[in-house]
């Protein structure tokens, strides 16, 4: 395993950022290669600790000559976001300098060719970081971007072209749900990882062996040793199932038994009022149409000071807010139903 340090110059004099990259060399050129990164949204740490638990497993496999495909690991992909504190609160989702989401604005290339990327010396620091991350990841057969939600189940975003071919990965990782999407106009990292292949002939795109996914490892507070160990084993099982790592002691994953739904089936449930949220449901709950989801206390102690929200359709609660203060119009939760949401915003990748 080789460790190298990537450096991103800051936008002002005297500032620069760095992050380590770990590379395992594969012994079989024909084996699929993998790229894993975590904490692109810099405060989302479940994937960071999962990688921390995964690394000794990969080092053991390397010592035993079982790494077949090359593996590149970036445990903390966003040193810019990691350093952003605003009045004591960490801000890892948006770049404060440009107000841009760190998981938007990646170049959507027409082909998987790093030569098509912008010059890595141009643009603001966050843009240069994005270009560099794509440079590191493009060309790998398997690209995993580890995130987490606010409070939620473990689930994957997967482009429709990769499903059901990626069902073995979802089963190997042991996630609860898979959300399928088909168009990314905002340039998420996942979108930038799969879009270059969409217009290639099937025999070149190789969707049968390609993996690109945003992994949502539950909630922001689910940074936990036992979960990290289980998630590391899930990542390892995926790498073994896809032939990147050899491990005869592991059996092939069974079929995926979790929820699979298109993005358009998600109801985001915007809050009609500002106030304090009393949730009636939590991630994983099954709800019937018309079931009470949450009560917003907007005028405490007054008659009519509470507003209730009901399920627009039957489904499963995928996520909810970790905080209980809400503004009018902010999304209260994600409900995955059996049919298309009436919410006009559904259909866009929401990580
Ligand atoms: Zn995220």
Image (cartoon, rainbow, N blue to C red):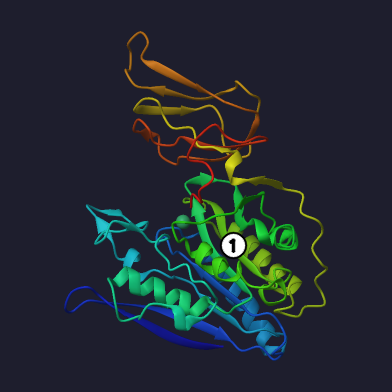
Left or right position of 83 against 210: left
Left or right position of 99 against 136: left
List x then y, in percent, for residue 252.
Answer: 82, 67
User: In the rendered view, would you say 258 is above or below 333?
Assistant: below
Q: Residue furthest top?
A: 303
Left or right position of 312 against 124: right
Q: Secondary structure at mark 1?
A: strand
List x then y, in percent, for residue 301.
Answer: 33, 13
Badge 1 density bin: few <14, some 14–19, many ≥20, Cα 10 Å: many
| Total tally of numbered discs in the picture | 1
Left or right position of 158 against 254: left
List x then y, in percent, for residue 203.
Answer: 72, 75
Q: Nearer the viewer, residue 335 or 349?
A: 349
Which of the 4 image quarters holds residue 140?
A: bottom right
List x then y, in percent, for residue 195.
Answer: 55, 66
Quadrant into which the N terminus falls: bottom right
Q: Residue at x 57, y 59 (%)?
A: 215
Q: Nearer the viewer, residue 222 or 218?
A: 218
Q: Residue at x 51, y 70 (%)?
A: 37
Task: Inspect this view and state whether residue 195 appears.
Answer: yes
Residue marked by disc 1 = 213
Task: Inspect this view and state whether residue 286 appears.
Answer: no
Q: Residue furthest left?
A: 13
Check mark 1 vs ligand 1: CB closer than 8 Å? yes or no: no
Which of the 4 image quarters holds residue 133?
A: bottom left
Which of the 4 image quarters holds residue 210?
A: bottom right
């Amino acid at each position: 395993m080789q460790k190298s340090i990537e450096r991103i110059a800051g936008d002002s004099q005297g500032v620069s950022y760095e992050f380590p990259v770990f590379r395992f060399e594969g012994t079989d050129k024909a084996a699929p290669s993998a790229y894993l990164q975590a904490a692109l949204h810099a405060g989302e740490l479940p994937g960071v600790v999962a990688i921390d638990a995964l690394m000794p497993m990969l080092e053991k496999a390397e010592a035993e000559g079982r790494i077949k495909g090359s593996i590149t690991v970036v445990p903390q992909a966003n040193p810019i976001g990691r350093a952003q504190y605003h009045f004591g609160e960490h801000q890892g989702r948006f770049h404060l300098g440009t107000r841009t989401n760190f998981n938007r604005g990646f170049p959507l290339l027409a082909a998987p060719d790093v030569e098509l990327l912008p010059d890595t010396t141009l643009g603001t620091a966050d843009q240069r970081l994005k270009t560099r991350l794509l440079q590191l990841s493009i060309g790998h057969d398997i690209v995993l971007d580890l995130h987490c939600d606010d409070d939620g189940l473990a689930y994957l975003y997967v482009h429709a072209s990769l499903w059901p071919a990626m069902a073995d990965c979802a089963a190997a990782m042991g996630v609860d749900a898979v959300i399928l999407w088909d168009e990314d106009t905002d340039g998420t990292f996942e979108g930038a990882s799969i879009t270059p292949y969409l217009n290639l002939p099937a025999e070149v795109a190789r969707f049968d062996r390609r993996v690109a996914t945003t992994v949502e490892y539950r909630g922001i507070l689910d940074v936990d040793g036992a979960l990290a160990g289980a998630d590391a084993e899930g990542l390892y099982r995926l790498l073994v199932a896809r032939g990147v790592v050899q491990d005869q002691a592991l059996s092939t994953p069974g079929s995926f038994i979790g929820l699979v739904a298109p993005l358009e089936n998600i109801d985001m449930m915007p809050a009609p009022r500002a106030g304090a949220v009393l949730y009636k449901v939590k991630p994983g709950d099954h709800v019937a149409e018309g079931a009470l989801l949450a009560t917003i206390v907007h005028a405490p102690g007054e008659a009519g000071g509470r507003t209730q929200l009901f399920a627009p359709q039957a489904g499963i609660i995928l996520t909810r807010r970790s905080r209980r203060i809400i503004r009018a119009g902010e999304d209260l939760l994600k409900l995955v139903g059996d049919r298309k949401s009436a919410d006009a915003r559904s259909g866009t990748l929401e990580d």
